[in-house]
Amino acid sequence: MNSITQVSDSERYARCIRASKRVRWDIDENVVRGRCFDSAEKFLPDGLSLAQVFTTLSANERRFVSQIQGRTYANVFGLVERFINAKVLELSSDHWFGDQVALEAMVRFSDEELKHQALFRRIDTMVGNVLPDGYRFDVDPDAVARAVLGKSTWAVLALTLHIELFTQLHYRQSIDPDTELSELFKDVFLYHWKEESQHAILDELEWVRRDGVLTAEERNLAVDDFIDLVGAVDGILRAQAKADAGYFAATCGRAVEEAETRAIEAAFLKAYRWQYIHSGVQHPHFSKVLFSLVTENHRRRIQAALATLQ
């Protein structure tokens, strides 16, 4: 049975390599192509920005909210890919003297994550060129990566698979179908999605592989780490929701009273929790993999923790 599993897993690594070669893209030649962003267009679709919960805003103001959220969306992906890449490089050492196909797949994964970070730094600058000054994303990606990597590998891989899966879900269900979005912004996430599709396969392979060597006590502690990581993500989202609401109030072109600013901040936070937490943990495949690895008690603990983030 083990040999059959090993052959199957080796072929899955090989398929990821073939996909990586097939969809390989360049930031300038394939994505940007000399284009600029236009402040007359939406950046994030209503299904992600949750435009409907910004009940006090006009249509133009909701478009501005989508642009603010689009810039934050790019910055959050640039942030998380810092720790994802570090973990991928660490895990690649497990394959140095073993399956060289698996090693190549992990090296390609790392190379693509570095490219994605460069893409999102570029997008942040380009969006900044067309939006008002004053936007802030005051999160140190290196500090976050160090904190995340201080947790168990099991928990980091759980968080990573969750991220890779919601990336695909966002593109297929919300970004691609929206005909009113910036074509440049859609292309950023089209090409990102093309490479993240095989990354999710590698995340799952590595997560299950790591789970197989854990003791019951180590897995119990790993579940605690995963809950802590989701809580840490929520802390970042709460801070950014406050920053983005303040930026909107300062630059939207009209006076915004304190009560409305608080309502706008709550709407930003609801949107961000949907984008970066709930859309991932509710993904059917993530739930299937996660709950196949944990006990019923672990499942209840995770669900109780998520229930507090509404």
Image (spheres, grey):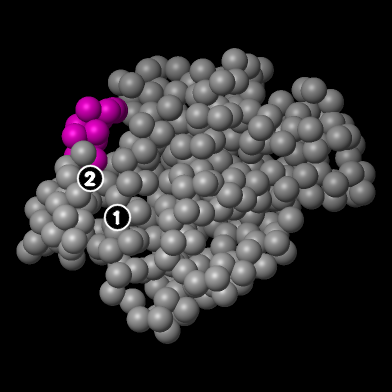
The front one of 167 and 41 is 167
Q: Position of residue 68 (x, y in %)?
A: 65, 36
Q: Quadrant of residue 234?
A: bottom right
Query: Residue at image x 18%, y 63%?
Result: 2
Neighbours of disc 1 within 10 Å: few (<14), some (14-19), many (20+): some
Q: Is residue 75 left or right of residue 245?
A: left
User: Where is the N terminus found, in terms of image quarters?
Assistant: bottom left
Determine the secondary structure under disc 1: helix
Neighbours of disc 2 within 10 Å: few (<14), some (14-19), many (20+): some
The front one of 208 and 3 is 3
Q: Position of residue 303 (x, y in %)?
A: 63, 64
Relative to residue 292, is residue 130 depicted above or below?
above
Residue holding disc 1: 205
Query: Residue at image x 36%, y 38%?
Result: 197
The front one of 100 and 296 is 296
- Residue 235 can be seen, yes or no: no
Determine the secondary structure under disc 2: helix
Q: Which residues are magenta?
A: 16-26
Q: Is residue 179 magenta?
A: no
Mark with earlier residue (2, 1): 2
Q: Amino acid at mark 1?
A: Leu
Q: Position of residue 208 (x, y in %)?
A: 33, 61
Task: Pick out the residue farthest to the front.
Answer: 1
Q: Quadrant of residue 24?
A: top left
Q: Is residue 130 left or right of residue 244?
A: left
Q: Is residue 2 left or right of residue 305?
A: left
Residue holding disc 2: 12
Relative to residue 116, is residue 180 depicted above or below?
above
Relative to residue 252, is residue 209 depicted above or below?
below
Magenta stretch, overall SS:
helix
**Disc number for residue 237:** none
Is there a contact, CB below 8 Å, between mark 2 and mark 1?
A: yes
